[in-house]
Image (spheres, helix red, strand yellow):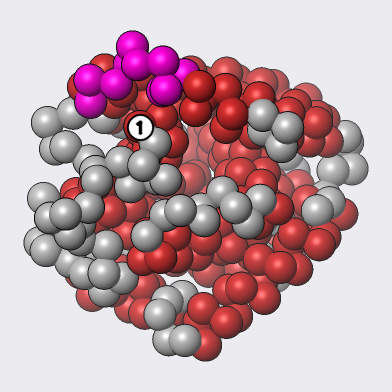
Amino acid sequence: MYPPFNPHGFVKAETESHHWHSGSAFRTQYFNALSMCFPELERRMIQSVRATLAAVGDQPQVRDLREPARNFIAQEASHSQIHSRLNAHRVNPNWPVLVNWVPKGHIAQRSWLSNLARTCGIEHLTTLLAVYVFRQPTLFKHVPPSIRDIWLWHAAEEIEHQCLTLNLYRAAGGGYLRRIAYFFLIVVTANTTILAQTLTNLAHDGQLLKPRTWRDACVLFWGRQGLAWFFARHLPTYLRRDFNPKDHHREACATALRWLRDYRGRGLDGQSTHEETSAHSTDPGLV
Ligand SMILES: [Fe+2]
Ligand SMILES: [Fe+2]
């Protein structure tokens, strides 16, 4: 358990509803489910990038990517730390975290390229979610600013490093078929895990069978600007052989990077979370 931690002021006020996302049980438990998956997911992505760097050695085509890869690792480690702390304050510690039931297993050296292909697939999902966040400014409108900033910061950094894993995969000799096979696998497993975690959270929260819960779910996923439509439209771009994340969603990406510059300018993060991570990490696998 992390010690009390409040650099962003996200400790819940006594009077505040525990449905921190717009007072909606579904939205709260869906975003809680995402947040509960991030620490373990990001730990695995860091492992896979590290395994790749170790496997390719000092090959010239990867040399230029070493520095961006180190930045990627630092950013994902920060996300993992902050979400662990956010979860400690926002999620009942007795609720099960389903992603932790998946055998931890070390990233084997011989399967490093497949693991990197899996990481590329996850990065496409997180990038799309991040783009959605910046295209829908109303999504976090009714969320306490301290929590909203964490989600926007994470989303903006996902956009900032969106090309790294795919560039690394291609430079390391990864091919199209492997990338696509692992993409399908990750789309199924990630969505199943998040859905199961959301339902588990709602059941523990006593909100699973309330009509409002499912009305909110329909609006979030199948409303006019719903998440489901957005993902259905943009997921398949990943199937292009020459797919490059930079070619898509330019406007939302520019907005995200501008927001990130401002945020760092306010001295609230980027730098400070990386320092926090190095200074307080309890998991040597993270930094
Ligand atoms: Fe992340
Ligand atoms: Fe990422």
Residue 230 image position (x, y, % from top left): 73, 35
Quadrant in the rendering for residue 222: top right
What amino acid does circle 1 point to?
Answer: Ala
Q: Is mark 1 within 8 Å of ligand 1?
A: no
Q: Which residues are magenta?
A: 205-214
Q: Is residue 37 visible?
A: no
Name the side, left or right, on which 35 lies relative to 251.
left
Q: Nearer the viewer, residue 128 or 215?
A: 215
Question: Which residue is drawn at the image coordinates 26% and 29% (left, top)?
Answer: 97
Question: Which residue is drawn at the image coordinates 26% and 69% (left, top)?
Answer: 9
Q: Which residue is mark 1?
A: 25
Residue 138 image position (x, y, % from top left): 60, 52
Give the vertical position of 286 relative to 204 (above or below). Answer: below
Residue 136 image position (x, y, % from top left): 66, 51
Is the C terminus in the top left, top right, bottom left or bottom right quadrant?
bottom left
Residue at the limit of the structure toward the top, as seen here = 209
Q: Is residue 270 visible?
A: yes
Q: Nearer the viewer, residue 74 or 229?
A: 229
Q: Secondary structure at mark 1?
A: helix
Name the side, left or right, on which 107 lies relative to 277.
right
Give the vertical position of 75 relative to 37 (above or below). Answer: below
Residue 67 image position (x, y, % from top left): 59, 72
Quadrant in the rendering for residue 180: top right
Name the side, left or right, on which 278 lies relative to 55.
left
